Image (tube, coloured by chain):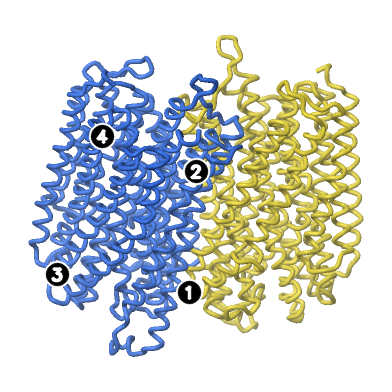
Chain colours: A yellow, B blue
Amino acid sequence: MALLSLTLLDSGVQLSMLCAVIGLIFAFVLIAIVARSPAGNERMRQISGAVQEGAKAYLNRQVVTISVIAVIIFILLFIFKDPPTAIGFVVGAFCSLSAGFIGMRIAVIANVRTTQAATSSSRRALRIAFNGGAVTGLLVVGLALLSVSIFYTAANKMVGHDMAIRSLVGLALGASLISVFARLGGGIYTKAADVGADLVGKIEQGFEEDDPRNPATIADNVGDNVGDCAGMAADVFETYAVSLIGAILVGALTLVGNSAAIIYPFVLGGISVLGAICGVLFVNVANGKPAAVLMGGVLTSAIISAILFWPATHYLFPTGLTIAGATRTPTQLYFASLIGLVMTAVVVAITNYYTSMRYAPVQKIARASETGHATNIIAGLAVGQHATALPVGFIGIAILLSFHFAGLYGIAIAVMSMLSMAGIIISLDSFGPITDNAGGIAVMSNLPKEVRAVTDQLDAVGNTMKAVTKGYAIASAGLAALVLFGSYVEELKAHVTRNGEPFVFQFSLTEPKVIIGLFLGGLLPFIFTAFSMDAVGKAAGAVVREVRRQLKAKPGILTGQDTPEYGTCVDIVTKAALREMIVPALLPLVFVVAVAIIKPLGPVVLGGLLVGTIVTGLFVAIAMTSGGGAWDNAKKFIEEGNLGGKGSFAHAASVTGDTVGDPYKDTAGPAINPMIKVVNIVAILIIPIFF
Amino acid sequence: MALLSLTLLDSGVQLSMLCAVIGLIFAFVLIAIVARSPAGNERMRQISGAVQEGAKAYLNRQVVTISVIAVIIFILLFIFKDPPTAIGFVVGAFCSLSAGFIGMRIAVIANVRTTQAATSSSRRALRIAFNGGAVTGLLVVGLALLSVSIFYTAANKMVGHDMAIRSLVGLALGASLISVFARLGGGIYTKAADVGADLVGKIEQGFEEDDPRNPATIADNVGDNVGDCAGMAADVFETYAVSLIGAILVGALTLVGNSAAIIYPFVLGGISVLGAICGVLFVNVANGKPAAVLMGGVLTSAIISAILFWPATHYLFPTGLTIAGATRTPTQLYFASLIGLVMTAVVVAITNYYTSMRYAPVQKIARASETGHATNIIAGLAVGQHATALPVGFIGIAILLSFHFAGLYGIAIAVMSMLSMAGIIISLDSFGPITDNAGGIAVMSNLPKEVRAVTDQLDAVGNTMKAVTKGYAIASAGLAALVLFGSYVEELKAHVTRNGEPFVFQFSLTEPKVIIGLFLGGLLPFIFTAFSMDAVGKAAGAVVREVRRQLKAKPGILTGQDTPEYGTCVDIVTKAALREMIVPALLPLVFVVAVAIIKPLGPVVLGGLLVGTIVTGLFVAIAMTSGGGAWDNAKKFIEEGNLGGKGSFAHAASVTGDTVGDPYKDTAGPAINPMIKVVNIVAILIIPIFF
């Protein structure tokens, strides 16, 4: 690897580290600002403290469970692969878990302060919730950039460039696998509690959301933190790190010896941290409707990044880049990077249309609620499926264009530039659960109804933002996974020989093994989400029975004379989440290894499997996250007083839809995102072991 | 084509015609037996007459609508393709429509007689309903075999062998496209009426099923006939004819000049008619539980066919068959044919497990109903998704084995032998709606409750049978579509040249265009079913509003003093079905032609699209039909007195699940089956036009 210009490599990676550090410093300034704002009265801090304690307790137990599995995988990697990959795995796993803790810590600081701010103004509440989210966004992105660049630099020095590149795959596996666990564990926890609380509380007893008489209400609020905040942060860390590593891998495998091609993804990531900071500043100074201000922040961030990408690309590739014999101009590479930014905007706009209560789809679900539970469900399922069309169409266009500009590397660049927007996008995502929790604290602290009205209004925006960022995450995951599939094919080429000659596998659709692979891969998202939904359904059922039992045993709870035992519900969902996350989380791992081991299957079927998982995974994930978001806001639409408002027949039906949407959008759907990548990463890792 | 042994060809096709005629004669004997049994009292015949009239009136209007579209396509084919293909299209379309009429006619003869038989014994009722179904099964299979063989023989004589083979694709298109319309039109009709009737009737008013006070009840019963009977019959005609044509096509394209390879599918089909007759006889003489007797009939039919396939295969291929240079022994070909039979048994057993109330999945949904509407829905969705795993796994094994035995031709043979079981399988499918209608007639004629109990018990078996046959239809459709995709690739080879040389396209997964095709194709089932569900939801909503209006305007309806206006509900669903079927039915056509026309896409993207549609189509269809069947029987399980029985909270939740399942299992899910094939057939047809 003497061909690599190590100076350029070092300076590029150092630049990205510098940007990451700037992002971290900015995040610490923000957190200081948030922490300085008032944390409310005694009662509020008490409740927030209880929620925080529950969240910490759960995350600690989750870490223990996951660590056992991580240690086993570490040992397997150490024995069957190599120590650097095994160490990469540990680094990835550790950072992913840390990202989860960061997400949770920040949220519990911000939520009570958002409640307090909501007592004075909607604008202040928006800023605190958003800044809390922005801290998470910048910390997670900074962590991802730093961990990959430090690990890469260190491995490069210690075990050489080739091995450094390969051990990055270990880091990616650590990040993805842990994030599947975090998404599932947190997702099952939060939705079992939420569904359980709603089914008895809202439907049977007519409680408001977060009514302190509901024995499941603390579990519900803890869930927001461990699922929507911690799970999401781990997930985004994974998405970012894996996309970065995927781009590096493609650069290293297809453009051997070209160090600029390896640095480019780092540089795009670094630059965009600066863009994200500008976006955050915009939201803090702009005035207007919450949704418009937030979108303005995203736009600012994208424009700054787009401007800075231009000189960076020309500096790194002054004479362009030779890919498969053809020279690509710097402008072509720049265009590939723009595609990622445009895709972000496109996916955000489309998901916004399907999940915001201002547009036809959500209102259609709301109207369908007037004729009953079943028509609400049918309409919601249909909206989710419709919502897949445009994103998938645009993903197709993005693939076509970015491949046209720079081959597989072009797709990798587009993915990386798409992910480079993660800093600002997660700020939006975290915003939702923070306001949700803020509302919970308001109700439980008996604050005036107006406070809840403020947080409710922000919460509806938050619902759309959450759906939007999930659409973004899954679209980028689909593209990232395609890049990983490309790496799988390249790795196969590099490793597999027949009769001493390098052997090139064909993955033609006319080969039955490819079709079988597509079927097996296509199956994964279906059964993965089936297991996840089962888990939520089962655990929620247990919560319902417990709540019914408490209300029956202590009728004084209903009148406020008795206090419910919140602890038993927390205990039920904790145990259920930890138990039920294991099977679905290990499913993709087992599937891939089984296909590799079973003789008549092997590398060609595995290749089909990787693509099959991406194809159906994309549809299932988009349908679930958009459908779920739409159901949630259809309920909010009715609660705003439309179609009969709260307490009407339509409202009851819309609560059913919202409840079905809960595991869709917060457990099963988003977990597909890391799952798709686990499948692809494991396949890359096991090539030298089995083939 | 002088190489073709015309004598062998003729005699083989004649044998299959002979078997078809025997099947038809047997069917006429059966119908005479059914028609001779007593048709009940005046009131019963009146109601049955009203339902029959409504069904005929709707089918006539549906024929008019579809004919307009068929004429346009006929003209397009006549101009841009060739007259034989256009004529084939008309033949296919006409036979598909006729099959629908046959299904409906037989059902209305059998249903009232089943009701009457149920007044004396469950066993007699089972036999009449089953024999009614068997008539449909044998007539549809006979029609398919005869129409394809007569058309093929005639075309062979008039325009030569090559053109005859190609014009068969026209016949396949006619059959498939019309069957998409019939499935959708009938499916929207029946489920809009059913859902509408249930939502107000059962949930709001506490009516029993088929309560004559419900203004939507006649529409509901008409729907059973136009959807489950007519739609299903058209669908199975299509599945059978297209599988036969697909097998002939693969034989003709990959084994040029080998007439035995073309006759073999005809012979398998013909022989199995004899097997089906034996199966029908078995059910008529056997004693035991309904489900066991019916399964015994299937088994008998399969065993007889398996025995007869052996000499037929050895007679046709005394020295085996040379495929791609390698000789396959007659025994290998025989094994390929056995795979189809085994697959039938496997799919039937698996779907039975997921949808029968005797097993865990249905009971899980029932238990989930105890905690509410939402948990019922979550459980049902999960069961549907779980139900995809085993069938898809076995389809993979079937592909691997049949390809191992005889390449693509082996897969074609396996499909054809699977479809050869259609005669007996449809007997089971038709059985469901006939008993369902029989129950309706019993309630509306004020017959004693015991009669309804008999038909209800048979109806539960019928639900499982319907789900089972849908699983069978979709699994065979997936395989048939793969065969068609193989034909697409072969046709491309035969037609496309570059610089005067034949050009072979590669469909490698490493080619972005293939991936884009997989995405676009994968999208089709999602939006196709979304449109279908929307249609049902919309129309059902209109029915609900109409029923509410009537009950408010004439309160005497509730007390039985006023008669509801049944006609307005019939009118609403008729118009809705005819209007709403157009867009989804034309969607696959438009998609394929658009991909062919748009320049940067073209033949490679189209190839990916065909496979993508098969992959996601299979999952979506199985999940919907199995999930829907399971929901339906979960409700029946509770209605049998479990978990609180009728009127309990769990029962209300289970009705919601059943209602959501209605469009899943009877509209959107089964329509995917012909849709997948339309996509593949259109692609084959347009090759010479666009590429």
Q: Quadrant of the N terminus of chain A?
A: top right
Circles 4 and 1: CB atoms closer than 8 Å: no
Residue A558, percent across and down? 60, 81
Q: How far apart are the alpha carbons under marks 3 and 2?
A: 55 Å
**Chain letter of the residue beneath label 4 in the structure image:** B
Residue pointed to by mark 3: B119
Residue pointed to by mark 2: B593
Q: Quadrant of the C terminus of chain A?
A: top right
**Chain letter of the residue beneath label 1 in the structure image:** A
Residue B141, percent across and down? 23, 45
* Residue sitting nearer the eye, A479 or B81: B81
Q: Are marks 1 and 3 on the same chain?
A: no
Local secondary structure at mark 4: helix
Structural crowding at the residue carrying mark 2, measured as other residues with C-alpha within 10 Å and reported as few (<14), some (14–19) or many (≥20): some
Q: Residue flagged by tag 3: what amino acid is it?
A: Thr
Residue pointed to by mark 1: A371
Indicate whether A362 appears above or below B330: below
Q: Are marks 3 and 4 on the same chain?
A: yes
Local secondary structure at mark 3: loop
Q: Are marks 3 and 2 on the same chain?
A: yes
Task: Give the label on residue B155, or none.
Answer: 4
Q: Residue flagged by tag 1: what amino acid is it?
A: Thr
